[in-house]
Amino acid sequence: MKVIQALARYFPDKCGGIQVNLNDLLPELRSLLALAEPTHDIDILIAAANNGSPHSDTYKYNDVEVYRYPVFPVPKTQPNHGQFPHGKFEDFANWLSHQKADIYHQHHWEVSCGLPHLRRAKELGMATVVTIHYPLPLCQRTTLMFNGQQACDGKIDVVRCSQCADSLSRKLPAAMVKGFSHLPLDLFGRVPLPVSAYLPASVDKGNLGQFVRPFVIPGYVTARKKSLLEMAKFADRIVAVCDWLYEALLINGIPEKKLELSRYGISYATQEKLIQVKQQSSTLKVVFLGRWDIYKGIDILVQAVKDLPAVIPIELIIHGIAQDERYRQTIFNLIDNDPRIRVEKQLTRVELPQALANYDILAVPSQWLETGPIVVLEAHEAGLPVIGSNLGGIAELVKHGIDGWLVTANETKAWTQALERLATDTNLLNKLRQGIKPVRTINMQAADLATIYKNLQR
C-alpha cells in the first residue's frame, strides 16, 4: 500500500500541532499497516508545499521521504481554497501522477494545499481522505466564535457569517448582503484588493479595505460553502478530530457516510507517569504552553492573575512559542514586572514531560474553538489537571470538577475567581489530580486511520 500525506508546510520549516501529530503518527501507522498486510510493501510519503520557491525539493525527515512541491509566486488568499491553482501547480500534478499511490490523505485546506490538489488525486483514481484540523473550512472569521464572543454551531449562512466577520455588513439589510454574495468570484480572485479585504475581522477605520469588505465578504462566505461541498465531492472520507467539528460538518450538508471521528492521541502516553502522588505546594504553580497568539488568550490569563489579591499564593509561568511578536510584547507590557508572572523559554517536546512535573495545573485560556488541544492530553498524562476555556475541544477533553476546571472563556473575573479557589482550596487540586484517567494514545489514533485506509481498499 502506498499512501501520500499532503500538507501546506512540513519540517524542518516552522510547524505546529498538525505536523507534530503526523510526525508521531506515521511510524505507528506504518507498523499497523504492515501487520495487516504482511505480504505487501508499505510506503508512506509526505507531499508539502514549498511556499515561495520556484523549485521542488526531496529529502528524508525521520525516515520518511518528503517531496516539497513549488508554490511560486506566493499566492494571495482565495475564497474557496483553490479556485485558481497556484503557480507551479503542474509540478505537483506531474509528481502525483507518477506516484501511483493507493491513498491520498490531505491535512490542510489552503491555497497551497487545497481543492485542486484533492481534485487531482481523485482524477488519478486514488482513494482520498481529508482530515479537518481547524475551523477554517467553515468560518470566515477562522475562529468559529460568533461576533468574537460565543461559540458558533458552524452553520454557513451568507447573512449571518458576513455580518459576523465584518462590522459594516452588520449595518446593511439582509437582502443587500445576499445580493453581494452573487457577485462573480472571478472578480474576487483576479482584481487586486487591499490586504485587509481578506482579513477575517474588521479593520481599523480609515483603511480602504474597510469599505471594500462589505462587497466581497458575502461572496467569500458563499465560496467557502461551495468549497466545503466540493471537498465532500472529491473526498471518500472526511476525518473530524473532535465532536463539535463532526457536528458542524453534518449541519453543512457533508454526508454522514463520508464522515469519521478520530481524536488526537499522544506518543508517550504508554510510559509510566512521572507523577503518581504529588504534594500540594504552598504556592499554586500554573503553566501556560502555546503560541504567542491573541486567540490563545494569554492576556486573559495574565490579567486574571494580576487581579488576584497579593496574599493569594500563585505563580504563572508562560512557555510561549514564537508567532506574533507584537502580541508577545503586549503581554510583557501587561505583566509589568508582576513578580507572580514569569516568561520562560520555549520547551522542546523532549523537555516537556519532565518540565510539567514542576507545575500544579495547566491553563488553556483559548478564545476560539480548539480541535484538540494535544497539550491537554500531555498535561493529563503528566498528572496535571487543566483549567481551560469552556469551549470546543477543551470542553470535550476536560471534565469539570473531575480532572479539571472549565471557565467562561472571555470573562477575566471568572478566571480570577477560579484561580483563587484552586490556590486556596487545599483539597480541590488533589481531587482533580486523582480524577485524571488514562489518555488517548497515538497508537489508538493510528488504529483508526489504518481501519479507514483498509476499508477504502476493499
Image: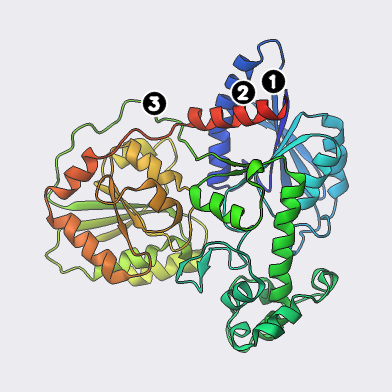
Q: Is residue 458 above or below residue 83?
A: above
Image quarter of residue 174 = bottom right
Depth check, front residue: 72 or 427: 427
> Which circle marks residue 153 in the picture?
none
* Residue type beneath disc 3: Thr
> What residue is disc 2 on?
30
* Relative image position of residue 254 (x, y in whole percent): 66, 51
> What residue is disc 3 on?
270
> What residue is disc 1 on?
42
* Relative image position of residue 139 (x, y in whole percent): 60, 63
Q: Is residue 314 above or below residue 396?
A: below
Taking the image as shown, residue 424 lies to the left or right of residue 405, namely left
- Quadrant into which the N terminus falls: top right
Residue occupying image coordinates x 16% and y 49%: 428
Task: Give the colour scheme shown.
Answer: rainbow
Image quarter of residue 91 = top right
